Image (cartoon, coloured by chain):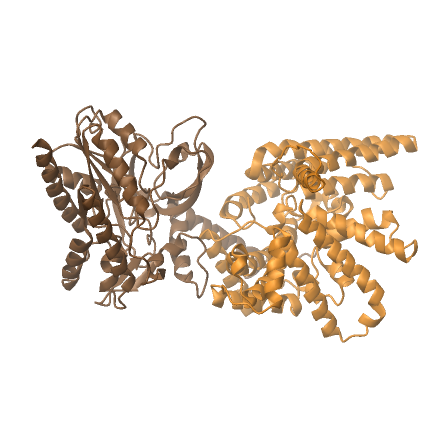
Chain colours: A brown, B orange
Amino acid sequence: MQERNITKFQIGLIIPWLLVSIGAVDLGLRLVPRDTASRFGVDRVTLMTPHGSRWRGVFEPNLSIKLVGCGRIAEAANLPSLCVPQEAEYHTDEWNHMNEASAHLPGASSVLLVGDSFGVFSESGFENDFARLLAREMGQGLYNASRPGLGPVSSGAIMDLLDRLQMKRGTVVFETSDTSHPPRADPPDQDGARRHFWGLLSEQSLALPRYSFYKLTRQDGAFYETQKWLHKLQNDLILPHADPYWNSSLIEKLRDGEEIGLLPGDRTSQPEENTNFDPEWERYWLDLSVVLHSRGVQLVVVLIPRKFIVYGPLLANPAPQADVKASYWRSLENSLRGDGIPVVNMTDPFRQAANEALGHGELIYPRDESHWGFKAREMAAERVAQELRCVLSADSR
Amino acid sequence: MLFNSRVFLLVFLPIVYFSYWRLKSRNHRYAWLTLSGYVFYSFWDYRFCGLMLFSTLVSYFSAIWLDRAATPGKRRFFLVAPIATDLLLLAVFKYAGFALTTTSRLAQLLHVPLQLPSIHIILPIGISFYTFHTITYIVDCYRGVIKPTRNFLEFSCYVSLFSQLVAGPIVRFRQIEQDLETIDHARRDAGLNIGWSFFVLGLIEKVLIADTIAGSINPLFQDFHNLSTVSAWTCALGYSYQLYFDFSGYSSMAVGLGYLFGLRLPQNFNSPYKAINISDFWARWHISLSTVLRDYLYIPLGGNRHGTRNTYRNLMLTMLLGGLWHGANWTFVFWGIYHGMLLVFYRVTQNRFDRLPKLLRQALTFYAVMLGFIVFRCTGFRMAGTVLARMFTPHGGALPTGVISLVLALLAAAYWAHIGPNPFEMHHDWRGWRLAGLVVLFLGSMFFITAGHQSPFLYFQF
């Protein structure tokens, strides 16, 4: 072995010192307080439910969590350059849902919220999610069983919830913003069924791998900061998108020249796409409505348009696909009304409000993620409350 | 644990390194390296540490008993028994599922009512490498090339040495014996510069070249039905460079780590894409495996000593088993046969082929190797057929993404593979702007590692 005298400018000392320095920075970022150095990024996780157990979804029971992230429980565009870190705190009840601990006491709730966007509290805290805003509007208790990222659940699962809540009468408010897939039949309990969704999950529940999905996880500071820089390079020109997650963010310019994060799948659909909705949706709600009616519960469907439908016409390069998708919601709304199911379609109100707000340089959906913002939720809470009052008064007559 | 991971670079390596050099006695250093090897291995699956320990114990005691055996019969027994044990481990963990599936399919084809269970056994990482370490040790003891060590710690240190544990190079005991024997006299600063130089070069090969190319071509391979002709050629070329720099990078890092601990590991790659014929390629590619196959399979089979036909048969058989060593899949068997055929073809046409211009011979050799790697990369013959068909028939379809990094990585790879010196040809005397450049590339690699832009080494799966 050739022997060499080591001087300070030789690689044998420079590299170890660099490693020590990198290690020190890494350690330092781990030691600073969590709120400023810990971030939540997205990891792909595979989950297998313990044998024989009934899978409840992405939330752990009795979980209290304070997180700092971009867009928090957002589906997409959490970490692009325009991301603004925000704080949020929530806890779950013993049934895994984001409710005050008292919400599931027998008779405490007369309204059950089911869906995806109802579980989102972007731009504000847990105390200002849709459920809290609606409860304030209504002045009565409700139970929020929504799960971010999860599509429609089966009627069986809803009946199961009503039983546990001991809700004999009342209303189920069912929200959806999903136009691409028809409802799936009770998927969570089918062994081996793979689904992708987003959410939070603690490591303890990863007992056995089976379901593949994405979770928000706490990342150490060094990883988080370098990942943000890496993501800037992963633009498909310099570096390819390394993870399907990154494919879910698309930066477009609004007509005022400001940037907004969208989902790229929206742009790829063709304008001539069929505007008729999938009849499976209508069948799904009809069946659900009948089942609920049999136990004195009324179904109200709330259609929340995706961000692209709202902002498509307001882009610097307007997207005709957005109008097609808006027609889809109107068509679905009309059909459901024809079937006697109360519907609140927020498409046109949101589009109008977004247009007006943009005139003042404001947005009703957060710039850096895909879910609705505080203003949109506030508006929807008002409309849904109106509809619920109508339903309740008709019911009492 | 990967060499290109933060836990290895920032936690494992510093702890093992500084503790190692504080130890003074031979046995302490053996024990420490053994322990660190088992800790390193347990990061994948601690349950398989027992398997490695079992293989180590069997080979260690067999070699001692073989040395003491008085009769040829007993010597043969202590040769065959440990080799059979190692091969049985390989057969169960690596080939059992493959054998059952193949038998079932064959029975189906022949309409034989045969119900065989379908089993999926986890392949213990590195089993192909450490079983070859122990097999070569036993055979060398039998041949009298080496004297079996009586020091169990020395032998277990040799088998579980973390730098070459999971993906080689396949280091024969005789190649490292001298350094192991004098491990207590090794000087820390003796291998510091060259060790880090090898390690950093390997890191750059892996992180900046192989992984960058992989980032662009892996999605294309995944969606191979939509490959365009341009993409198919990009995949073929890209994978040839990816595989080389991935494995060569690992080997360089292993050699560098060896130097850091006072151990000299052998060269595993000698610029194989500069080869001027297929025989030359195998003298340069995965040298530790090809020499093991040569010394422990090809030559015992008769080598080229018993006429032309037997030579061809031996070549084919050696390459077939070499292909199968890479994995339990018919694509690897085919790849082995393909290279066997190339070697036979070269022997047949050697006089004419060697008269061609050197550049043309290099190009033809690289082209033949590249085509073989398509089958090696694909998960099945249908996929390989599709990729090959797209290469040779004009077809529109998906194009690679990340073009800038892909082109830069391919250019760097092409230069380094075909023109530039490999790490064993370098002086490792980094000064001035070359040193600055190397440090910048190292920091670039660390950036990608910290950002989680890392992937396992391709040869881990073998």
Residue B433 position within the rendered picture, expressed as x and y whole percent measured from the top left:
54, 69
- Identified at 80% across, 34% down, the residue is B63
Residue A256 position within the rendered picture, expressed as x and y whole percent measured from the top left:
21, 67
User: In terms of depth relative to the viewer, which is nearer, A177 or A325?
Assistant: A325
Relative side of B68 to B126, left or right: right
- Give the image quarter of residue A360: bottom left
User: In terms of depth relative to the viewer, which is nearer, B190 or B38?
Assistant: B38
Q: Residue furthest front?
A: A338
Relative side of A142 to A203, left or right: left
Residue A119 position within the rendered picture, expressed as x and y whole percent measured from the top left:
26, 41
Indicate whether A165 appears above or below B364: above
User: In terms of depth relative to the viewer, which is nearer, A185 or A266?
Assistant: A185
Name the quadrant of the N terminus of chain B: top right
- Give the image quarter of residue B162: top right
Residue A151 position within the rendered picture, expressed as x and y whole percent measured from the top left:
32, 43
Q: Can residue B161 be seen?
A: yes
Indicate whether B248 appears above or below B15: below
Indicate whether A288 appears above or below B262: above
- Identified at 80% across, 70% down, the residue is B353
